[in-house]
Structures are given as structure tokens and as C-alpha cells.
């Protein structure tokens, strides 16, 4: 849920990157953080094991365009993919305004992607957050792998035929479509906020966040 601070005239939106371990969630945030001007971003906080797997979350407030006189900010999180961190994952998902599901395109990780998607749905149900009320964008990462599964196969496993989720084919390590994916979910979040909260803060132009490389 967006946090509106009328004293400071700020609105903060929470976007969470979910997905199977090592799919590229942290790489997305690292790339975005490295490409934004220092005035636009806060510190990137990462807690990892020796194998560089996210244990808790990465946090990065991203300042966006103003909305009806209010400064819009985006807090970007990742959630741990490992099964035994389910409680932490559920906690980080609480209060999310938008989701990016990062799928690993490797052909031998299709089942892991599917199980991760199912786990995400269970976490949302446990948080009493219907997916219908939460913008979600699918990111098919690592599209440069020689054994990358066809997009049609990933769509069959992870997308829905009725009202499909937006899909971006990415190579997060090289930044390919990383900002396009972030901007897409941000725009949906902003539009929904404009539609549901008025007149304070008053709906503005609906401009997308200034998260360009």
C-alpha cells in the first residue's frame, strides 16, 4: 500500500522483485542503482551468503516525478528465493504496490520457476493480498543463455491466457530491458494510485518515473 506523507508531501510506493534463487533479482537492483544519479537514489543494502544469494532484502528508494505536487518515491526490494526463507519472503511482500517476477530462462530451471511462482501466490494469499489487486510484470531473464527456453514455453508455464501479464525478455547482467521492465510496473502502479486516491494528493499527469539509464 502506498504511503502518503502529507507533511513532507511524499508518496512512497513499494515494488518487490520475486523469483527463484539466482534468477537475477539482485542483479536487476544492482544495475538500476549503478545507473541512477546519486541524487535520485539511496544506498543499496544487500545481505548475502558466501554464494551471493540474497538472504533478506535489498532496499533502494528511487525518487520519481512529482504527482500533483507530491514527490513520488519507489522503494525497490528483492525477496529471498530459497524455500527455507519463506517467512522472510512473506514479510517483505507485505504492503507491496507492484511485483516483478524474475524467471530464469535456463531450460533446466523451468520447474524451479514454476514452484517459485506458486510459492509467490501462496505468500500473497497468506498476506490477504489478491493478485488481481497487485500489478505484476514478468521478466524472463538470461535470454542470452545457449539453452534458454523458448518464450512460448515460459508463457505457457508462468503467464495466463486471459489478461496476460506484461512480459520483458531481459539480460540483467548487461542491463537489457531492465529499466523498461521497472518503468512498466511503475507506470501501472502510478495509474492505479491516480484512480484510487483523490484528491489528496491530487492526480497529476501520470508521468512515468524518471528511471532511465
Image (spheres, helix red, strand yellow):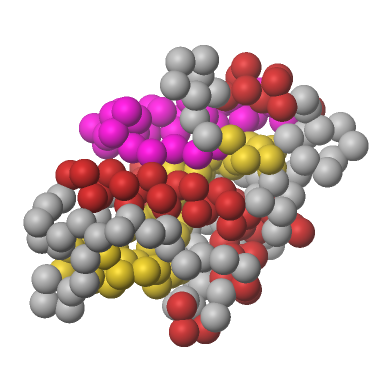
Quadrant in which the C terminus is drawn: bottom right
Q: Give the residue displayed 34% in from the left and 30% down from the top.
A: 131
Residues rendered magenta in the picture: 109-138
- The percent coordinates of residue 152 (x first, y second) are 70, 21
- The percent coordinates of residue 29 (x first, y second) are 57, 61
40 is higher (above) or lower (below) than 141: below
Location of residue 33 by image quarter: bottom right
SS assignment for the magenta stretch, majority: helix
Q: Give the residue displayed 74% in from the left and 58% down from the top.
A: 173
Location of residue 65 by image quarter: bottom left
- The percent coordinates of residue 69 (x first, y second) are 21, 72
Residue found farthest to the front: 205
Viewer-closest of 157 and 212: 212
Q: Is residue 61 left or right of residue 35?
A: left
Q: Is residue 49 shown to the viewer in this render?
A: no
- The percent coordinates of residue 204 (x first, y second) are 25, 60
Residue found farthest to the bottom: 39
Q: Is residue 195 left or right of residue 109?
A: left
205 inside magenta stretch: no
114 inside magenta stretch: yes
Q: Give the residue displayed 33% in from the left and 37% down from the top.
A: 134
Amino acid at each position: 500500500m502506498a504511503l502518503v506523507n502529507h507533511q513532507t508531501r511524499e508518496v512512497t510506493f513499494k515494488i518487490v522483485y520475486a523469483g527463484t534463487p539466482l534468477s537475477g533479482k539482485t542483479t536487476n537492483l544492482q544495475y538500476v542503482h549503478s545507473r541512477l544519479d546519486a541524487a535520485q537514489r539511496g544506498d543499496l543494502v544487500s545481505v548475502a551468503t558466501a554464494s551471493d544469494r540474497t538472504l533478506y532484502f535489498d532496499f533502494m528508494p528511487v525518487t520519481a516525478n512529482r504527482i500533483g505536487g507530491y514527490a513520488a518515491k519507489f522503494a525497490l526490494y528483492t525477496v529471498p528465493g530459497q524455500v527455507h526463507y519463506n517467512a522472510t519472503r512473506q514479510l517483505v511482500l507485505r504492503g507491496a504496490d507492484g511485483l516483478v517476477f524474475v524467471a530464469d530462462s535456463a531450460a533446466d530451471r523451468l520447474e524451479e520457476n514454476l514452484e517459485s511462482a506458486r510459492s509467490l501466490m501462496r505468500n500473497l494469499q497468506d498476506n490477504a493480498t489478491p493478485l488481481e489487486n497487485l500489478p505484476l510484470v514478468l521478466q524472463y531473464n538470461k535470454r542470452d543463455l545457449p539453452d534458454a527456453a523458448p518464450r512460448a514455453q515460459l508463457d505457457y508455464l508462468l503467464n495466463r491466457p486471459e489478461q496476460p501479464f506484461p512480459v520483458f525478455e531481459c539480460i540483467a547482467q548487461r542491463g537489457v530491458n531492465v529499466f523498461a521492465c521497472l518503468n512498466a510496473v511503475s507506470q501501472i502502479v502510478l495509474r492505479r494510485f491516480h484512480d484510487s486516491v483523490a484528491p489528496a494528493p491530487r492526480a497529476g499527469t501520470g508521468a512515468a518515473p524518471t528511471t532511465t539509464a
